[in-house]
Amino acid sequence: PDFPGPAGRSAAYMPSPSSDPPNVLQSSHPLILHKITQMRKAKAGPKYLNQLLREVSTFLCYEATADLEMEPCAVTSRLGEEKGQRLANRVAIVPVMRGGLGMLEAMTEMVCNARVYHLGIYRDKKSLMPVEYYNKLPKRVTVQTAFVLDPCPLSGATAIAAIDILKAWGSTADFKLRIKFVCIGASQQAVDNISSAHPDVPIHVGLIDRLHDPDGAPLAPILPGLGDIGDRLFGTDGNDDFDEDGLDGA
């Protein structure tokens, strides 16, 4: 599919499975690609953006949870006792604030018994290093799988820091926490950096912006028009020129 944007960018969004590391799983679902394009519209205000973000997150959740382990269980139906299946392990959803909060509702609706652990990480403007400012991980590990949510990594530093924190928290001599990373869009550099730092962590991404400058750095902003998801969701981007009631054609 083609995507509106500056000339030369269309090809940058096409899947390239042969060149991606094996743990990078870019979606090819038409509705994900369509809705991400809608998210980039200038008139998409917080209400409409939140709706689209929730919808895209639902599709990505479906893909990211496809290999969760199941176990047999009994269910009482109108016809009596029947056999069924249920999730075998406990799951945690870990949104990286603030942008990850926009993906949280969709994930918890799909995995209704999931625990929710919040992480707050920002990138220092001078050092460009990730700084942890909020951590609500419990003292005791009671989950087997954790999904890290961060909508649009540019360099991947924040995502790497979040995964580092989870691994340090959830790994013991007898147990290793299973971690998956879920994002809406990402630069090629972010995907490569996360994959290199954590090759054992599957990366589920809606769209990869593969363009970069001559030095290999991603062109900013990635997915032009998408902007800072956290700022757009919470109305702190300084833009008041949007449609309050949503947009047609979504």
Image (cartoon, grey):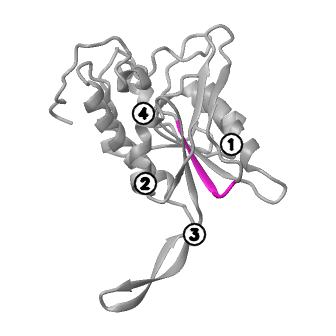
Which of the marked residues, 1 or 3, is nearer the chain's N terminus?
Answer: 3
Q: Amino acid at mark 4?
A: Met
For disc 3, the marked residue is 88
Left or right: 173, with 32 as reference point: right
Q: Position of residue 37 (x, y in %)?
A: 31, 30
Note whether residue 166 is visible. Answer: yes
Q: Circle 4 sits in a helix, a strand or a loop, which is it?
A: loop
For disc 4, the marked residue is 14
Toward which corner of the image does residue 240 lie, by quadrant?
top left
Q: Circle 3 sits in a helix, a strand or a loop, which is it?
A: loop
Which of the marked residues, 3 or 2, is nearer the chain's N terminus?
Answer: 2
127 to 89, vertically: above or below: above
Give the mark toward the camera: 3 or 2: 3
| Nearer-the-camera pick, 239 or 213 | 239
Q: Position of residue 42 (x, y in %)?
A: 26, 18
For disc 2, the marked residue is 62
